[in-house]
Structure formats: C-alpha cells, structure tokens
Image (spheres, rainbow, N blue to C red):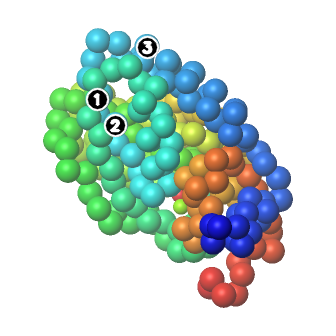
C-alpha cells in the first residue's frame, strides 16, 4: 500500500480550475506549431525562467520541431506570498553565449511585467540576433509596465493561480491543471 493514499490531493486546495489539463495539452501543440513556423530554418536558444516555467518549458520544447539549445535563468521576486515583494533578483545567470543567436525567453505567467522586462534587458545586453518572449498565462491586470509577450498560451483573469509549474510557497507545481488557490490558503500563518 502506498503512503500517498493518506495524503490529501493537493487539488482540493483549489477554489476552481481555470485551465484544464486537456486545454493545456492542446494549446501546447498549437504553440509548438506557431513557434516552429516563426523560426523555420533557424536554430533557437530557449531560455526558461525557473522554477515557474520548468514544466511548461519541458513540455513545450518537445512540440518545437527545430534544433534548439536550452538554458535557464533563476529569478526570485516572490517571497512565499501572493504579491511581489521586491524587484526580480537574478540568482543563477544564463551560461549560454547568446551573441548572434535567436532567443526565445519563456516564463510561466506575465503579471506586472517586471520579471520579463528585467530579463529581456539582461538578454539584450548579450547581443542576440533576435529576442521573443513566450508565456503560458497572461494575467489580465492593469499593468504599470507596457510589456506584451510574443507568444501567449492563455489569457486569465486577475487571480492568484497555482499548478502546472506555478506555485504558492513552492507548493502545487505538480498539479496537471491550473486553478485559483482557496483564499484562506494564500497566507496561512504557518508559512509566513
Ligand atoms: P511579474 O514579474 O509580476 O510579471 O510576475 C511574474 C512572476 O511572478 C512569474 O514568474 C511567477 O513566478 C510569479 N507570479 C505572478 N502571478 C502569479 C500567480 O498567479 N501564481 C503564481 N505565481 C505568480
Ligand atoms: Mg513563483
């Protein structure tokens, strides 16, 4: 008998599902086709922003029918809370040489735009041949920064969501679908 049987399913912590597993899988195929068509005949460098984009990047690159290189950049802008508490901080930098390379920067979600604005600036300073951005989710929030992603999986309402790579305090990343975390679980005192 597995010890997991005693563990409550983490999806019980969700108020509602916003994007189902089936919808994500179908959209991944379409995004892969869009990206493959946009870069036909070229080689790409895919840069994933971890931890959030790790699952999206892993699934999406298998739908891109082009030669590509993969690297990741580790950024922190949330400290176990549901609101950004500081400017994005680069904790682990890009190791690939991006000079003269077509770069596709991938994140899980576009919220305020601070993260992508900061990382695109870092990458531009590395003199790539081109730079485009891709996000799974585009949160429909009044944005202080004028930033739009080139490839978007889904537009979602201004809610705090978890699942498919998105976390709250590093939890819920493994959920196959994306949903709104129950409000009473968003700042439990034991996680503060
Ligand atoms: P931005 O810098 O405000 O655009 O936020 C982007 C980063 O914030 C993403 O990489 C996520 O890690 C995190 N984030 C923003 N909104 C959410 C959310 O609803 N759930 C989980 N993480 C989020
Ligand atoms: Mg996060």
**Quadrant location of the N terminus in the rendered image:** bottom right
Give the CA distance from mark 1 to mark 2.
Answer: 7 Å
Label 2 C-beta lies within 8 Å of the nearest ligand 1 atom: no
Which numbered disc covers residue 68?
A: 1
The residue identified by callout 3 is: 37
Give the CA distance from mark 2 to mark 3.
Answer: 15 Å
**Quadrant location of the C terminus in the rendered image:** bottom right
Q: How many other residues sit within 10 Å of disc 1, few (<14), some (14-19) or many (≥20)?
A: some
Which numbered disc covers residue 121?
A: none
The residue identified by callout 2 is: 46
Q: Are marks 1 and 2 in contact (CB under 8 Å)?
A: yes
First along the sequence among labels 1 and 2: 2
Q: Are marks 1 and 3 in contact (CB under 8 Å)?
A: no
Q: Judge whether 46 appears above or below 77 on screen.
A: above
Q: Are marks 2 and 3 in contact (CB under 8 Å)?
A: no
Q: Residue 60, image x and y in percent?
A: 47, 33
Q: Quadrant location of ligand 1? A: bottom right
Q: Secondary structure at mark 3?
A: helix
Q: Residue furthest bottom?
A: 190
């Amino acid at each position: 008998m597995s010890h997991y049987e005693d563990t409550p399913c983490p999806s019980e912590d969700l108020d509602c599902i916003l994007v189902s597993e089936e919808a994500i899988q179908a959209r991944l195929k379409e995004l892969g086709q869009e990206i493959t068509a946009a870069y036909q005949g070229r080689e790409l460098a895919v840069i994933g922003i971890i931890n959030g984009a790790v699952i999206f990047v892993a699934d999406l690159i298998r739908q891109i029918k082009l030669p590509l290189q993969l690297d990741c950049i580790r950024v922190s802008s949330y400290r176990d809370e549901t609101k950004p508490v500081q400017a994005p901080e680069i904790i682990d930098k890009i190791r690939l040489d991006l000079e003269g390379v077509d770069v596709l920067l991938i994140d899980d979600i576009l919220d305020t735009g601070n993260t992508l604005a900061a990382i695109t600036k870092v990458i531009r300073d590395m003199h790539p041949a081109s730079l485009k951005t891709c996000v799974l989710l585009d949160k429909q929030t009044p944005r202080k920064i004028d930033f739009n992603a080139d490839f978007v999986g889904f537009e979602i309402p201004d809610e705090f969501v978890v699942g498919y790579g998105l976390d709250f305090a590093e939890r819920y990343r493994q959920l196959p679908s994306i949903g709104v975390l129950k409000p009473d679980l968003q700042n439990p005192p034991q996680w503060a």
